[in-house]
């Protein structure tokens, strides 16, 4: 568990801002204690200071995970958000998209969301901004990147992709081994 | 573009075959079934009618004749005759008469009947013109082996054939022809069976006739030979006596013995499973009321041995495990347990109270076509799934972490642990994280949860489950649980769901039935003991809210449960407290030769047959002092073990012997430990309590290894006394 380098911190926050905007600071300034980001084997964990102290007593070799894994840095030093970050992203995300029940399954298998599966979408969603994907019953099931603005969506072809898939909860089953 | 095409294709393809598939199979089944039904019904019906008529006629004839005879003879005679029926059938006195004119008479009409009804191939007709012998007949009616049998039956049974019998044979042949004409072998077989029934019926009647005829013969004989007359009288008297004797015997048997002990031949030649099952039932009833139902000269041992073997074959257990199970349960319950272990428990899910409420979840799942119910009043988060149209482990709700698939029994240890908010809790053997996430949910993500597992691969499951369920207050680590006190101590509560033989979850993993033996159990409870001691060491008695340890296994063997807890009670300053579970059966205080601490009543056992959940054991311990007492107490153990060795030999089995070994190893530990450890300890303790704990473990294991080889009896007579040698107050672990 080591502190993130300056550059990596910047990369991480840039990425997070894409999804939750200014709410990023809510992740840092929390009323229930201080939380911090720590890095272990290129994985970034979001963890409370209190828990961190305790976790540091465990030998690094034996420590598997602590707190919540947000994602990992790739070899090219880009940050990739994992589905495990959904717990924190979903409540803060300003832009959301709801998919119809018929399209849920498609998305959970890792496909993009097409216009015909689009149930609702937040007003004024900008292009290429991170969006959290919800079912119609308001269960967050993943996130992605909007390929069109809300206005463009209205006039889109029914088979046009609206959201590029990035992560979905189906990964808990599909790729449990690589989550952390 | 490609995708569009794919979607369309798949949809179209799916729709097409679906409709067809539904329509096609039904008529295929129906046709066959209908045909079968009609043919069989018609035939049997006619036959029955005919047979009934014939039977009536015959009965009338017989009655008339008998009435005549009765006038002449005693009632006794008639009885004899009825008794002899079967014997007479086989006796061939009158067989030669089977091929006389009488036969010719009845042969003709039968064949005519056939021709009329069936309009069989003409070859048959021409042949039937011979009409001389039965044998010819059977030959003509081409190919039916069963028919041959029937004919031969007729030969044997019907010696003296009177007019009445014609009809019977006729009907039989009719039957077979019908079957030949209309259907394949299966049908003919069925009908053969039917006709077989008919045959018996007919032959009975014929037998009755015979009897009457024979009576008539006897009458004639009597007239002819006076010596024979006297002889017959004698015989009759003897028979009457026999009859009475038999009746008496039967009465006695009915009172005494429902079940006759099988002979050795029967035992050696394995019967069908059904027979074995029946025998199991019988033996169980016999054992239930042994004094009254036992066979003279048979001991209880013989019955239990037989039961053991039968149960092993029927449920395919190895003998060792079955023996152990027989010691745990009374026979009646044992069978229930085995039966329950064959069927899987209902699927249960646990609502993740971090993300949703049970009612909402139930509603959502019902909308997906899942049929479910609350698991019981004892749990507020459990749901039983009866049936589901969707895979219950892959619904969006599941993936979003609203619930986890978890056996009902897995709720129990967590409920017993009763975690409080803001506590520091350790789950020593956490994978795959079901119970640990339950703890986190009860703590509402406050405090700290350490989820440890010794298997690195399985820790990945913990990670996945925790993130899916939204558990954020957890540290997941990969240590050997026995070394965990070295890593961290001072937990408020510790849950130890120890690895075990899994005898409670045979339904989930049937390989347990055959793979476990004494060594496996021994290995298991050795690890469990060490783990439990480690768990107790990790816990802090100073905790204001906690200081509790919950020990649970999914095994039902007392060796892995009560004995382990009992062991810990002696070696650490812990006491048992009520688990807070208001159901389940009490833990054993006595088991075979073991006499456990009476407070083990407070532990809880759960069985598949009584509670409809996996077999489980839960014990809750409260640590009242961080001091690790001197390991002198083992003398109690030793004492018990001294008894055990004697008792175990009584059983004299493999089991008994190995049991002897275990206590040895235990009994030796205390002896050596004071010598080896004590001398070195005092200095170490102050400096490094951990080292001491380790060295203890090592010493133990070494001693065990040795002691298994060495002879035991030397060490047994040790001074005991010392009720609770908390002796040296060790400042060992305050933090």
Image: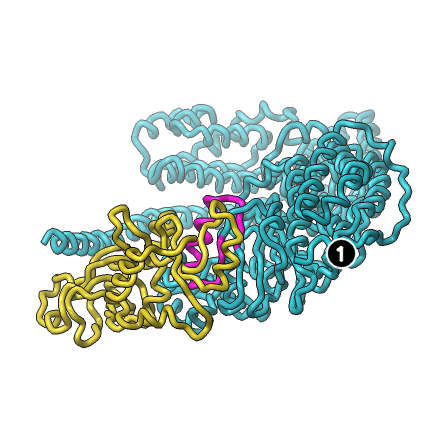
Chain colours: A yellow, B cyan
Q: Is residue B22 above or below residue B323?
A: below
Give B397 or B324, whichever is nearer the viewer.
Answer: B397
| Residue drawn where x is 38% and y is 27% of the image | B142
Give A115 or B470, whichever is nearer the viewer.
Answer: B470
Element marked by disc 1: loop
Image location of residue B456, percent across then percent down: 48, 44
Q: Residue furthest bottom?
A: A123
| Residue drawn where x is 62% and y is 62% of the image | B492
- Which chain contains the residue that carries disc 1? B
Q: Looking at the image, how many numbered discs can be counted on the residues?
A: 1
Quick check: can you spot residue A120? yes
Give B50 or B296, whichever is nearer the viewer.
Answer: B296
Residue B257 in magenta?
no
What stretch of residues is rendered in magenta? B451-476
> Mark 1 packing: few (<14 Cα in 10 Å), some, or many (20+)?
many
Direction from residue B167 to residue B670 in the image, left or right: right
Q: Kindly identify which residue carries mark 1.
A: B573
Residue B466 in magenta?
yes
Q: Quadrant of residue B326?
A: top right
């Amino acid at each position: 568990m080591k502190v993130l380098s300056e550059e990596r911190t910047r990369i991480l926050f840039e990425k997070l801002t894409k999804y939750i905007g200014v709410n990023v600071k809510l992740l840092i300034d929390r009323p229930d204690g201080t939380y911090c980001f720590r890095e272990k084997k290129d994985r970034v964990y979001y963890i409370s200071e209190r828990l961190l102290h305790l976790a540091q007593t465990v030998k690094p070799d034996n420590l598997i995970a602590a707190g919540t894994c947000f994602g990992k840095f790739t070899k090219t030093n880009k940050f990739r958000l994992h589905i495990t970050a959904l717990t924190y992203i979903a409540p803060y995300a300003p832009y959301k998209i709801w998919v119809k029940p018929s399209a849920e399954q498609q998305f959970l298998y890792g496909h993009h969301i097409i216009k015909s599966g689009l149930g609702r979408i937040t007003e004024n969603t900008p292009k290429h901004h991170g969006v959290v994907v919800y079912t119609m019953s308001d269960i967050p099931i993943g996130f992605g990147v909007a390929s069109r603005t809300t206005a463009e969506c209205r006039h889109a072809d029914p088979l046009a992709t609206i959201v590029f898939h990035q992560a979905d909860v189906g990964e808990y089953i599909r790729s449990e081994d690589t989550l952390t | 573009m490609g995708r569009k095409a794919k979607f369309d294709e798949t949809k179209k393809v799916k729709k097409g075959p679906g409709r067809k598939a539904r329509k096609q199979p039904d008529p295929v089944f129906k046709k066959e079934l209908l045909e079968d039904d009609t043919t069989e019904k018609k035939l049997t019906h006619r036959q029955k009618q005919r047979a009934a008529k014939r039977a009536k006629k015959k009965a009338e004839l017989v009655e008339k004749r008998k009435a005549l005879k009765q006038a002449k003879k005693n009632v006794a005679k008639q009885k004899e005759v009825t008794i002899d029926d079967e014997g007479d059938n086989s006796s061939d006195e009158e067989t030669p008469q089977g091929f006389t004119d009488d036969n010719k008479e009845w042969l003709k009409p039968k064949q005519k009947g056939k021709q009329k009804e069936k309009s069989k191939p003409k070859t048959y007709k021409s042949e039937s013109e011979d009409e001389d012998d039965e044998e010819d007949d059977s030959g003509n009616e081409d190919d039916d082996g069963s028919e041959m049998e029937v004919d031969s039956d007729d030969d044997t049974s019907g010696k003296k054939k009177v007019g009445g019998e014609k009809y019977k044979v006729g009907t039989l042949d009719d039957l077979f022809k019908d079957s030949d004409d209309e259907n394949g072998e299966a049908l003919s077989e069925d009908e053969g069976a039917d006709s077989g029934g008919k045959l018996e019926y007919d032959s009975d009647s014929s037998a009755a006739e015979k009897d009457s005829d024979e009576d008539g013969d006897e009458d004639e004989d009597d007239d002819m030979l006076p010596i024979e007359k006297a002889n017959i009288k004698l015989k009759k008297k003897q028979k009457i006596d026999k009859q009475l004797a038999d009746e008496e015997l039967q009465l006695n048997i009915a009172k005494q013995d429902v079940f006759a002990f099988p002979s050795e031949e029967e035992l050696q030649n394995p019967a069908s499973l059904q027979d074995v099952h029946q025998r199991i039932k019988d033996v169980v009833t016999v054992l239930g009321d042994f004094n009254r139902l036992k066979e003279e000269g048979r001991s209880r041992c013989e019955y239990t041995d037989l039961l053991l073997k039968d149960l092993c074959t029927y449920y395919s257990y190895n003998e060792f495990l079955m023996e152990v199970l027989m010691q745990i349960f009374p026979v009646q319950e044992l069978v229930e347990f085995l039966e329950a272990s064959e069927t899987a428990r209902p699927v249960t899910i646990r609502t993740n109270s971090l993300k949703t409420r049970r009612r909402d979840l139930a509603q959502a799942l019902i909308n997906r076509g899942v049929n479910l119910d609350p698991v019981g009043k004892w749990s507020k988060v459990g749901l039983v799934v009866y049936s589901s149209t969707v895979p219950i482990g892959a619904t969006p709700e599941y993936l979003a972490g609203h619930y986890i698939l978890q056996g009902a029994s897995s709720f129990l240890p967590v409920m017993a642990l009763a975690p409080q908010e803001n506590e520091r809790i350790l789950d020593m053997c956490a994978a795959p994280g079901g119970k640990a996430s339950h703890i986190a949910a009860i703590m509402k993500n406050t405090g700290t949860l350490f989820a440890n597992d010794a298997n690195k691969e399985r820790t990945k499951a913990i990670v996945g489950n925790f993130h899916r369920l939204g558990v954020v207050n957890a540290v997941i680590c990969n240590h050997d649980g026995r070394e965990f006190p070295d890593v961290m101590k001072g937990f408020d509560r510790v849950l130890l769901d120890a690895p075990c033989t899994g005898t409670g979850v045979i339904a989930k993993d049937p390989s347990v039935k055959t793979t476990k033996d004494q060594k496996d159990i021994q290995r298991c409870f050795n690890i469990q003991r060490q783990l439990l001691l480690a768990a107790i060491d990790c816990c802090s008695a100073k905790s204001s809210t906690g200081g509790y340890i919950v020990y649970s296994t999914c095994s039902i063997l007392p060796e892995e449960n009560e004995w382990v807890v009992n062991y810990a009670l002696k070696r650490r300053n812990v006491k048992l407290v009520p688990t807070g579970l208001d159901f389940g059966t009490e833990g054993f205080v006595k088991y075979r030769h073991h006499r456990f601490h009476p407070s083990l009543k407070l532990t809880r056992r759960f069985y598949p047959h009584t509670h409809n959940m996996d077999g489980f054991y839960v014990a809750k311990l409260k640590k009242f002092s961080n001091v690790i007492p001197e390991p002198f107490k083992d003398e109690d153990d030793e004492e018990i073990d001294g008894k055990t060795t004697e008792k175990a030999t009584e059983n004299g089995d493999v089991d008994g012997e190995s049991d002897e070994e275990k206590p040895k190893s235990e009994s030796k530990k205390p002896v050596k430990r004071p010598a080896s450890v004590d001398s070195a300890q005092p200095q170490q303790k102050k400096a490094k309590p951990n080292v001491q704990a380790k060295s203890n473990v090592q010493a133990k294991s070494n001693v065990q290894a040795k002691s298994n080889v060495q002879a035991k009896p030397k060490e047994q007579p040790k001074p005991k006394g010392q009720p609770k040698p908390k002796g040296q107050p060790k400042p060992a672990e305050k933090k």
